Image (tube, helix red, strand yellow):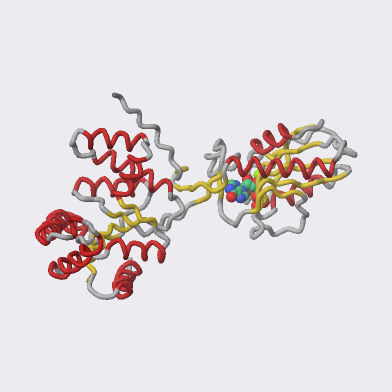
Amino acid sequence: MIIFVPFKAKKVIKLHDTYFKPFITAQQIEAAIDTLVSQILADLGDEIPVFVGVLNGSFMFVSDFVKKYPKPCEVTFIKLASYEGVKSSEDIQRLIGLTQDLTGRTVVILEDIIDTGNTLGEIHRIFKNEAVKALRIATLFHKPEAYKKDFKLHYIGIKIPNRFIVGYGLDYNNLGRNLPEVYQIKDTQHMTNLVLFGPPGAGKGTQADFLKEKYNLVHISTGDVFRYNIKNETALGVLAKSYIDKGALVPDEVTIDMLNAEVEKNADANGFIFDGFPRTNAQAKALDALMDEKDSQINAMIALEVEDEVLVQRLLERGKTSGRADDADETVIRNRIKVYYDETAILKDYFSAQDKYHGVDGVGSIETITARLSTVIDSL
Ligand code: IMP
Ligand code: MG
């Protein structure tokens, strides 16, 4: 059987050296345009307006807007160009493209975005000389916090915070105009990505739950990710199962692809807690490479340290109520603990070499241990 693994749909995109995360979907844009069309239609009635798009950014908006406009209308474009040879080019602009006579006409400016309002100021200045009947301003996006002018904005599609966006006609140094949805600049500097370790019975799950709440992290348990993909028969799940069914180990590449999908799904997270991965040097390197691709990194390996005798007692205690067979037998328990130390020794070395290993005393009340973990995380 040949299994096709679908092209990885990247949620976070990179333009030049900057990362952007999804912000406004194509559907949300469409809904905003529908609303703008109805509002403008309600105001203009049977009058034939001249829609004037401001290039370059507005081309997509104008195209989609006029396709939805159900009555006769004219469409034209203008562009504000800086005077050539002038150093402070932002200040002096001239308008090109306005060739038709607009005397007595109702003009609706279609802007992709109104930010400071400087561009709009120029447009107003230029239209003062045209004897138009009315000049109305419609903008798909607006940043109220950045707006410094008093010109009335008659129609506003979507108000956004004062952050840089790309897509749907808007560019970042000329890239991104072709994207059908809108992305927002992403800060990757503040991500906290942890690899959490702890022997069986150390309270890793409990602590992961607290940490993900406190720091808005996403807990990625490899076991859960595997079960999810296999249960839902995702392409990667089917692929992983084909190895498991043969009694073979799932190749690291497949596991990494699954983790990548989880990371992509949570582009908004402040970071991730990796649990159950990496287990080998090769996996640790692959995880580093994955993080690097996201312009991020693993900040720390945190290991909960609990003495063997305490673990054995805790697990035996848990076995009395949990019904888990592997929690009932002392020999089995001691072996699981040994396997843990055999496995993690390599990783402890790997992360210590990068100064990223943090052992945390895992004996005490839940709150005490959370506080100890927080001290480490806050210091990163
Ligand atoms: P203004 O500050 O209102 O004059 O906006 C000037 C121009 O800056 C707009 O026409 C856009 O071309 C560009 N612009 C403003 N904010 C953004 C943004 O978030 N992304 C991309 N371009 C922007
Ligand atoms: Mg513009």
Q: Which is nearer the eye, 111 or 286?
A: 286
Q: Which is nearer the eye, 131 or 137?
A: 137
In-image side of 296 versus 334 (left or right): right
Residue 83 screen position, x and y as percent: 67, 43
Residue at 76 percent across and 33 percent down: it is 75
Q: How many numbered circles does the render carry?
A: 0
Residue at 36 percent across and 34 percent down: it is 235
- Which of the 4 image quarters holds residue 361? bottom left
Q: Relative to 278, is 234 above or below?
A: above
Residue 343 screen position, x and y as percent: 15, 53
Residue extending furthest toward the left: 331
Residue at 35 percent across and 31 percent down: it is 5
Quadrant showing the C terminus: bottom left
Q: Relative to 238, is 348 above or below?
A: below
- Residue 82 visible in the displayed image: no
Residue 78 screen position, x and y as percent: 72, 38
- Residue 93 visible in the displayed image: yes
Residue 227 screen position, x and y as percent: 32, 45
Quadrant showing the N terminus: top left
- Which of the 4 image quarters holds residue 133? top right
In-image side of 178 versus 362 (left or right): right
Residue at 34 percent across and 52 percent down: it is 220
Q: Which is nearer the eye, 320 or 238?
A: 320
In-image side of 332 versus 51 (left or right): left
Q: Relative to 232, is 220 above or below?
A: below
Q: Relative to 4, is 133 above or below?
A: below
Q: Which is nearer the eye, 235 or 44?
A: 235
